[in-house]
Amino acid sequence: MSNARILIVDDDDHVRDALVDELSETYTVEAVSSGGEAFDALSLHQYDVIISDLKMPDHDGIEVLEFARTHQRDAVRVLLTGYLDEHARKALMAPDAPYKVGKPWHDEIEIVVRRGLEQRERARRLSASVDDALNLSTFDAEIAETCTPMELSEVIVRRAMTIEGISACGTVVRVGTEEHTFTGAQVPKDGPGWYVDLPLDADGDLRLRVRGVTASARQLVEYMAHRAQRACGILKPRISPLRDLVGPGTRMNQLMRQATMGALTGALLHDLASTMQSLSAALADVTELAACGAPELAVAVTDAQAAGAEAVDLFVQMRKFIRDGDVNVRPMPVARLMDRVGRLAGGFVRQKAPLKISALPDVDVEASESLFVQVLVNLLRNAAQASPAGGTVDVMVSATDNEVVFAITDDGPGVAPELADTMFEPFASTGEEGTGLGLAISAYVMQLCNGRINYRKDPKRGACFTVTLARAKK
């Protein structure tokens, strides 16, 4: 806090001047020579730090710092002394005691001032976070009373701007390819601190954008967006921060990694079977063409090499994830992902219901290919299982400037109400088949890929799951 204002109180001219010279390089420093002058200054002005000598002719440092405690807003108080009498010892043992720096102080005074200001800043942020959290206790009731998107947006923006650490907040509405500020202010993507862009409605056309500087403020904003989404019928995973899931030795990480390994094993066998079939066919062609000296030999060899490379890459990704939980997120074409999804799940889905896939945008996403493919495969299989006779499973893929959204919709009954709040948690299932781990694994994988998974009940059909990934930068 380089703009901190410091008051030095000492009757020794040399000490006072030395402190002013030492601290003025970093802070704004004022100095007085007596306790009486200090009382006057503390009554008129606010200071961040008060440094007072213990022994002075009129009022000692204990009196000065006690006066500062009652007249200043959480100022850092420092007692400067070469020795302690019983009065000073007792004051320094009090619960709200000042810092103590001995004479000569060398560089200790700068360290104490810096640490004191850092501690005060942490205390202020904690207090602000608690106050903000308490103020949100009536948030659900307030958004429940809103009737239009405009009213909902106004409530969220107004509440967000009361949170300590929020610098800009607004909502935008998308109409086609255009965006318009709905409520609040325009929020720049670039700038200090963090920036979030969160959907508030089912289609993602109403979005909340916020810029802030503290982690606690971001958590509160994300909570508010989550509650607004619920008001619009969207459900999303209630999962712990990634650092709590993937820390060394954490039990949840071990369980989720084991569950994910199980899900990947089936895909691995399928991919290996297909890969080996391609490899065998290509090698057979190589053998036959080599005998004839045909020019197509180079093409066949290339096919064989590509098939082998795919198998090796799949093995490497599996080994890294099983051993270290390592996730290789990289740019991946949407068309390639959907091709793999179709090969893995298309046959199963079409046995249950027609599968319709929209036109695919010609863009790349940031994803771990093997892991993300399993998320889509799991959602497609769930949709097929839920589809009634005559139902259809639709996959709609759309892209914005920043994200790509994969929406899977079926004609089933939707998620049972008793599972709505826990569907993304392990073993949340009422079906006789399956383990209840599919959606929990999907939520876990989406977090590893820095993406999102949401659920909503389609107004005219059944369940609609959306998974969202960041669009790869060119």
Image (spheres, helix red, strand yellow):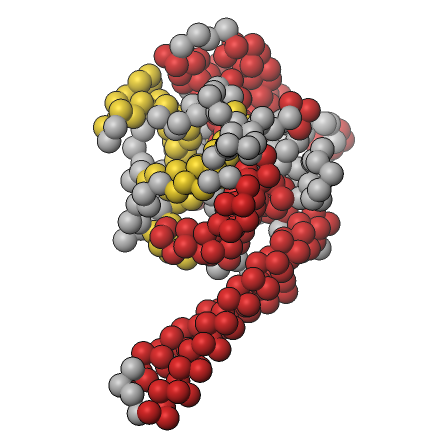
Between residue 193 and residue 159, name the one nearer to us. Answer: 159
Of the 4 image quadrants, the one containing the N terminus is: top left
Picture coordinates of residue 348, whole percent (x, y)? 55, 49
Q: Position of residue 106 (x, y in %)?
A: 53, 50
Q: How many marks?
A: 0
Q: From the viewer's perspective, is residue 11 above or below residue 329?
A: above
Above or below, comparing residue 309 to residue 248 in the picture: below
Any part of residue 59 in sight = no
Q: Looking at the image, is 369 positioned above or below residue 192?
A: below
Q: Residue at x 51, y 39 (%)?
A: 353
Location of residue 99 by image quarter: top right
Q: Position of residue 19 (x, y in %)?
A: 46, 40
Q: What residue is at 58 percent from the left and 26 percent from the top?
A: 413
Q: Quadrant of residue 200?
A: top left
Q: Is 408 displayed left or right of 422 in the figure?
A: left
- What residue do we see at 57% from left, 58% from top? 267
In the picture as drawn, the residue positioned furthest to the left comes out as 178
Residue with the most extreme front position? 390
Q: Position of residue 142 (x, y in %)?
A: 52, 9
Residue 134 in which image quadrant: top right
